[in-house]
Image (tube, rainbow, N blue to C red):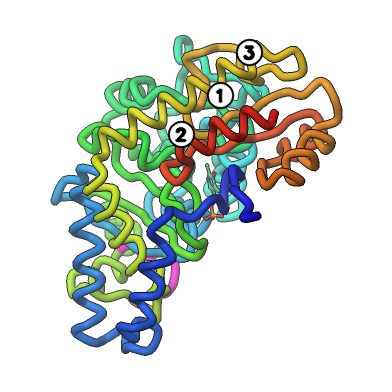
Amino acid sequence: MKNIYFTPGPSALYPTVHGHIQEALEKDIFSISHRSEAFKQIYRNTVVSLRSLLNIPNDFFIFFLASATEAMERIIENCAADSSFHFVNGAFSKRFYTIANELKKNPQKVEVEFGNGFNFSNLTIPDKTELIGFTQNETSSGISTPLENIYEIKRHYPEKLVAVDIVSSIPFVDVDYSKIDCTFFSVQKGFGLPAGLGVLVVNRRCLDKSLALKKKNLNIGSYHNFLSIKEQGDKFQTVETPNVLAIYLLGKICEDLIEFGIEKVRKETQLKAGMLYKFFEQHKDFEPFVKEKTFRSQTVIVVNTTVDSEIVINKLRQNGFIVGTGYKEYKNGQIRVANFPSHRIDDVDKLLDCL
Ligand SMILES: *Cc1c(COP(=O)(O)O)cnc(C)c1O
């Protein structure tokens, strides 16, 4: 029996990935030079498909990195001289903040308890803040921050750069790029691809900031800084030898999702999330961890279990369903179920039957 991975990343592969890898082998993707015309074609194709799928405007630039964690570091290095501000409500938003600390950017934060959303009234962000970091979908707790709240912060502080982690909500989340400055994600979650590629989307203001920092002789990173990546990107190339296969596959999956229809992807995601939440609300042994419906993630469903969650996880595993454990101290009291485009309605039905 083949396992179905409902883990929040890496997760189930998108069903067409196998065929695309086969085709990549046949096309010698693994051997071509990253300075060749063939590579430039792949690069260009992936950028075009991503723009089209996610509605990314032409004045935003798309950068390929190693991971989403790298994107956090690059954003902090290139968008803040010495002051960032972070919305912290779980492990990944904390990571963003910690990286800023490690890079000595004197980060400030507003922090709420694990499993809670933010209260946006009565919130002040220090004047000197240059960069504001959000984790739109906290994969550790299943909390989603409404985009409207993020846009409102940007409206309030138009001079500050706003960076949004959309790793586990893309491609479900529909970002209005005119209301933020940069977003980032990696591909092993909602895109159903093997891990090993991060994507960072930045506007002109981020590039200007990076240039201003450089002119002040501040560190903006070594081989991967916004200016070096942009310079190569303009030639449909990367600074280093990249994960060519991953860039190729991302373009192919974007084409598949465009063909399937992004609106349909989003509708189905909501439908499956509805099925999952309803089931867990009604079952005596389970309870959705996030109480406030407006903060409930549609793509990562976190559930309290009355028994040790290891028992539930093992039982599911015996039946071919792999779900995530709770995060860190919640490891034994929760399960996490991913709801990505690669998860078919049918598979969700089967998972719930088994539960
Ligand atoms: C998984 C995840 C990350 C880290 O992604 P990597 O590709 O492992 O660097 C960052 N933020 C969120 C919200 C995530 O879910």
Going from N to C along the chain, the mark reached first, 1 or 3, is: 1
Residue 19 in the image, given as x and y percentages of width and height = 38, 67
Residue 271 in the image, given as x and y percentages of width and height = 42, 24
Looking at the image, residue 110 sits to the left or right of residue 41; the answer is right
Q: Which residue is located at x 66 percent, y 43 percent?
A: 321
Crowding around mark 3 (Cα neighbors within 10 Å: few <14, some 14 to 19, many 20+) is some
Whole-number angstrom distance, CA of label 1 to CA of label 3: 9 Å
Q: Does the stretch in magenta take in 223? A: yes
Foreground pick, 11 / 230: 11
Looking at the image, residue 292 sits to the left or right of residue 255; the answer is right
Q: Badge 2 is on which residue?
A: 345
Looking at the image, residue 32 sits to the left or right of residue 76; the answer is left
Residue 246 in the image, given as x and y percentages of width and height = 40, 68
Q: Badge 1 is on which residue?
A: 276
In the image, the residue with mark 2 has its CB under 8 Å from the nearest atom of ligand 1: no
Q: Where are the magenta residues, as a range?
A: 219-226
Q: Badge 3 is on which residue?
A: 281
Whole-number angstrom distance, CA of label 3 to CA of label 2: 19 Å
